[in-house]
Image (cartoon, helix red, strand yellow):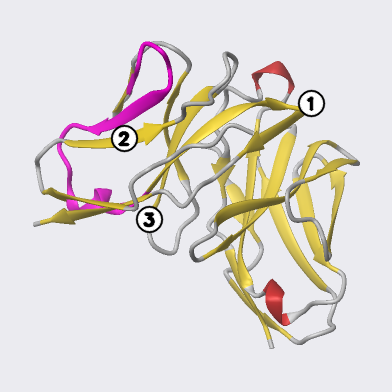
Amino acid sequence: DVKVTQSSRYLVKRTGEKVFLECVQDMDHENMFWYRQDPGLGLRLIYFSYDVKMKEKGDIPEGYSVSREKKERFSLILESASTNQTSMYLCASNEGGGGGRSQPQHFGDGTRLSIL
Amino acid sequence: DAKTTQPNSMESNEEEPVHLPCNHSTISGTDYIHWYRQLPSQGPEYVIHGLTSNVNNRMASLAIAEDRKSSTLILHRATLRDAAVYYCILRGTTSGTYKYIFGTGTRLKVLA
């Protein structure tokens, strides 16, 4: 089974801190994704990556950056955390190439981040 | 981007079939229809997907309308563990990207 592992289930940080959320997948998937999930808004795509060192902005990239130095690892960075970034963050991965759109995404269990 | 419309909530009795509807009237010819569910305190879990034909797997069945403007996820015998939020998502290529657009889904309540 595909496993997507997020480094923390719960995280509490302070306003202005630089925050790193880590995600690792074990299935050699090309595509990796970061979403945030807020009540009433569903899941919203922040960034995704279709290869090492490649990235594309999603719907809400402001205030975030990402890093993908190795195929299995995709990091989300909050450059200067703010209270409106308090949310559930979900990482996902799937196969890339032409099959990417027909293959399911596999999600981690999420990181619940609180910014005080 | 094509969007989906689902009822906010549904209820079902345990061990009865459940039909979860989804409308996607602006679907394009290359969009796959994916269904996910999310249990409390977990990430979304893949359930099933299809393009044109009806699909079955161990978890559920997916019935796709002939014009592809709607689909129905069928849970043949609901159990308490099926209580979750169910998302219907179109998966296609938009401007060269691979995007999922998650709506707010249908919250399924299963009554014992």
Magenta part of the protein: which range? Answer: B63-85
Magenta-span inclusion, residue B64 = yes
Q: Give percent across and percent down for residue B29.
A: 57, 13
| Dot label at residue B96 | 1
Q: Amino acid at mark 2?
A: Pro
User: Mark 3: few, some, or many residues within 10 Å (few <14, many ≥20)?
Assistant: some
In the displayed structure, does residue B67 sit left or right of residue A23? left
Looking at the image, is A111 positioned above or below residue B76? below
In the rendered structure, the answer to whether residue B35 lies left or right of residue A73 reads: left
Q: Are marks 1 and 2 on the same chain?
A: yes
Mark 3 lies on a secondary structure that is loop
Residue B39: image tag: 3
Q: Which image quadrant for residue A92?
A: top right
Horizontal and vertical percent for residue A86? 65, 75
* Residue A28 in view (yes/no): no
Taking the spot 61% from the left edge, 70% from the top edge, the residue there is A87
Q: Amino acid at mark 3?
A: Leu
Label 2 to label 3, Cα distance in Å? 19 Å
Q: Chain of mark 2?
A: B
